Image: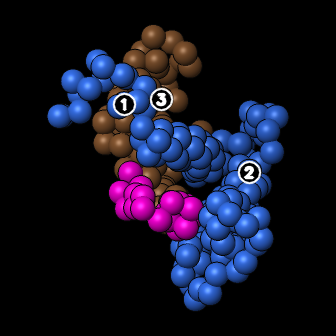
Chain colours: A blue, B brown
Amino acid sequence: MAEIPNWLVNFFRYFLTPDFSLASMVMLVTWLVSGSFAEILDEMNLSNLMRLELDPGQEKGDAPARERLMSLFFTMGTFLVVLTGLVRLDIRTWMLNTYKLTFTNMLALAGGGASTLVFFLLGMALLSQTRYIDLHTR
Amino acid sequence: MRNLPRATIRNENSFKLTSQALAVLMMVSAAFTLLAVFQSLVPNWQPYSLPVLCLFTSLVRLITYPRFKRMTQLSREWVIAVLSEWIVILILV
């Protein structure tokens, strides 16, 4: 609250701070990706699938919902694996001084390794569940 | 469409709840990986609130999606709903 008067002085400097901008961008991406998840899961509910089973003509031109879910999961997973790999490279030193890439000594599950692993485990659980509901309608 | 048996409806509700919970947890795991990247790039900045914010944003998005779906896209009520959701998110950020 104490910062609010500073916005009148220089809005961009005091309101759009780098950490706020970065966090907002992450929230925007989270919002969009969650929207995609919500759309796909909504299409995959039982009554929707049964309606499509009875009248296949209602299906949109897009790929089936499960395929889109798999595509979203593997795209996100690949991105996270790349990020986990980047954490293991000393990019900060590379950017600041030497332009020489070195590996940091890190445990396998440290630096985003554990969270990426958990992401894949949860994704597999979600995919198997959607497979179950897909088979359940047949 | 024929009426669904009660057990099937219960099954559908549990599917919906579980899959939404899994999707939210996946977003939180992704946020933890991003946190590790930010910490390695800027050691002084420790945005520990990022996973919590991601949890909130994805939860809100998944819960409000059916309501947004019923609205016409880019209609006045849709714009007001999206803007109010975003104001709450930005205040939390």
Whether residue A38 is visible to the viewer of this picture, yes or no, is no
Q: Nearer the viewer, mark 2 or mark 1?
A: 1
Q: Chain of mark 2?
A: A
Q: Name the residue type under label 3.
A: Phe
- Callout 1: few (<14), some (14-19), or many (20+) C-alpha neighbours within 10 Å? some
**Residue placed farthest to the front in the image?**
A97
Crowdedness near tag 2: few (<14), some (14–19) or many (≥20) residues, C-alpha within 10 Å = some
Q: Nearer the viewer, residue B46 or A112?
A: B46
Mark 3, residue position? B68
Q: Chain of mark 3?
A: B
Foreground: A20 or A35? A20
What are the residue bounds of the magenta stretch?
A: B33-53
Quadrant of the image containing the N terminus of chain A: top left
Q: Amino acid at mark 1?
A: Phe
The answer to whether dots 1 and 3 both sit on one chain is no
- Left or right: A59 in relation to B26: right
Q: Earlier in the sequence, mark 2 or mark 1?
A: 1
Q: Can you tell which mark lies on residue A43?
A: none
Residue at screen point 31% across, 42% down? B92
For label 2, the residue is A68
- The chain ID associated with circle 1 is A
B31 shown above or below B63: below
Look at the magenta stretch and give its main secondary structure.
helix
